[in-house]
Image (cartoon, rainbow, N blue to C red):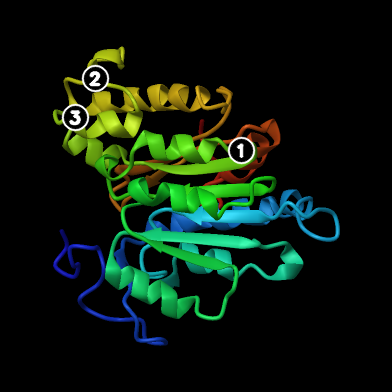
Amino acid sequence: MKKCEKRNGNCTAAVDPIDQLPVQCVGVWAKDKHHYLRNYLAATRNVRARFMPPKGTGGTALIDLFAGPGKARVREPVEFIDGSPLIATSIPHREHGFTDIILCDIDEENIAALQKRTEGDKRVTIIGGDCNQTIDKVVGKIPPNGFAVALIDPFGASNLKFETIRKLAAFPRMDLIIHFPLGSMKRNFLEHERFEGFLGLPRSRWGVDIVHGDDVRLLIPLFRRQLAMLGYPERGDVTYPSIKNMQQVVLYHLVFASKDSLGDKIWNSITAKLPSGQGRLF
């Protein structure tokens, strides 16, 4: 843990200079994740329009299961940035934002910060507690006949249960953007029980041997096959962009899943280039 971080990942060195509320400590690579999220939300504008007046009434939802305090402080170079909750709330109505924004976090400090930062936004519902235990409350807030996207961004594999994903996947139009924590899994590769709940399978059914840290990458196709069992077809050309630290070590992958081939097409279009603008080598 970095010296500037509390146990919840929030910064001890500073609060946000504008609202004086807590911020999460992040590396500069967090901006890469936000780049993909922003581009995905922009690219799905026309999809959302089909479920919002005047075209439709089904509604649109963004679900953030590990929302944090809503803002972050990049350690170096120091910069204060919006987190995923404020990225979602900042989308104006003319760009067909969301009718419902559901933010979840287990930490009381983060919940209090989210409440302050989204105060007055009637679209926002904040649910405190372990999202694996409160998922039924989350599901109850999602428009059943609309379009939704779930951002699932846990600190580590043990923080997310596959059964939580299963309940979200019951919706007919639910896109998923899932943080696959490759780096932390490699560091703890012998602690297989940490991964069983995340993958939704006991070790005896993985079909792969994890005897070295690098073997953890073999669990990504297994995870993808598990998603296919929930109605998310495996399409071989869908990319899982890697988020790397300053030393170019992969920290995690963003696993995208959609039941509609258009969703995969959109995701591939926004991940065809790195956040730097350089073309991706597949």
Q: How far apart, in angstroms, are the residues tagged by discs 3 and 1?
A: 33 Å
Earlier residue among tags 3 and 1: 3
In the image, 110 versus 263, the foreground residue is 110
Q: Residue furthest right?
A: 54
Amino acid type at image mark 1: Asn
**Regarding mark 1 in the picture, which secondary structure is present there?**
helix
Mark 3 or 1, closer to the camera: 3
Left or right, 44 with respect to 38, comes to right
Q: Is residue 74 visible?
A: no
Rendering coords of residue 130 (x, y %): 31, 53
Q: Quadrant of the N terminus?
A: bottom left
Which numbered marker is on residue 33? none
Left or right, 156 with respect to 35, comes to left
Q: Is residue 231 above or below residue 242?
A: above
Rendering coords of residue 22 (x, y %): 31, 77
Looking at the image, do the residues carrying marks 3 and 1 touch, with CB atoms under 8 Å apart?
A: no
Say which residue appears at 68% left-offset and 51% top-offset: 43
What residue did someone put label 3 on? 193
Dot 2, crowdedness within 10 Å: few (<14), some or many (≥20)?
some
What residue did someone put label 1 on? 268
Which numbered marker is on residue 203? 2
**Regarding mark 2 in the picture, which secondary structure is present there?**
helix
Q: Is residue 48 visible?
A: yes
In the image, 24 versus 275, the foreground residue is 24
Q: How far apart, in angstroms, are the residues tagged by discs 2 and 3?
A: 8 Å
Q: Tally the marks.
A: 3
Q: Is residue 194 above or below residue 207?
A: below
Looking at the image, do the residues carrying marks 2 and 3 touch, with CB atoms under 8 Å apart?
A: yes
